Image: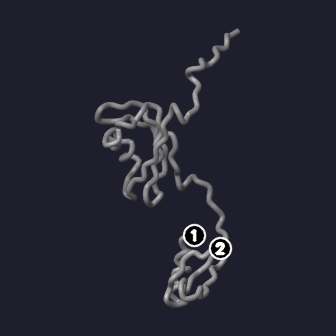
């Protein structure tokens, strides 16, 4: 029979204290190969610790991953990918109908505005048409 060896107390700690977690927003054209290059984070090595994680999100959300720092030198860091979002394998979100915004005149201070879900989203338009165009852009943005 194998004797179970229990985990020593010093090896069990609250993650907030032992594993730093950072986030990096990278330009849209950045690739996974770029962020896993040992010299990509060269300007930030002073805060790196082995075991820390870095959540990466590109401006266009095409690159979405989490890296674990394995080793650090004075000029580079070795990282491993522990999570990578794959658009093709991700479950599809069902399309839903979004309620139409309400366009109204809010008085001399707010002028023309549009509301969605009872909340003023944007105000200060000079005409009803301008508020309507902004509302259309807002709805398109919500649809993704």
For residue 129, side relative to residue 69 (left or right): right
Residue for point 62% across, 55% down: 91
Q: State the residue lying farthest toward the right.
A: 1
In x, y percent, where is residue 55? 48, 46
**Which residue has dot 2 on it?**
98
In x, y percent, where is residue 71? 39, 30
Q: State the residue lying farthest toward the front.
A: 109
Badge 1: residue crowd in 10 Å (few <14, some 14–19, many ≥20): few
Q: Is residue 32 visible?
A: yes
| Foreground of the two, 110 or 128 | 110
- Up-down: is 49 above or below 111? above
In x, y percent, where is residue 108? 54, 88
**Which residue has dot 1 on it?**
142
Badge 2: residue crowd in 10 Å (few <14, some 14–19, many ≥20): few
Mark 1–mark 2 CB contact (< 8 Å):
yes
In x, y percent, where is residue 23? 46, 47
């Amino acid at each position: 029979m194998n004797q179970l060896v229990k985990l020593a107390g010093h090896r069990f700690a609250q993650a907030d204290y032992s594993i730093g977690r950072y986030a990096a927003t990278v330009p849209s054209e950045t690739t996974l190969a770029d962020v896993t290059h040992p010299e990509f984070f060269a300007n930030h090595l002073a805060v790196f610790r082995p075991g820390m994680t870095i959540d990466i999100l590109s401006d266009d959300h095409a690159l979405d991953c989490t890296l674990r720092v394995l080793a650090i030198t004075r000029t580079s860091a070795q990282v491993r990918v522990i999570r990578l979002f794959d658009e093709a394998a991700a479950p599809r979100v069902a399309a839903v109908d979004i309620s139409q915004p309400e366009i109204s005149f809010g008085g001399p201070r707010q002028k023309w505005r549009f509301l969605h879900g009872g909340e003023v989203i944007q105000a200060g338009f000079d005409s009803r048409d301008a508020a309507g165009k902004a509302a259309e852009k807002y709805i398109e943005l919500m649809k993704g």
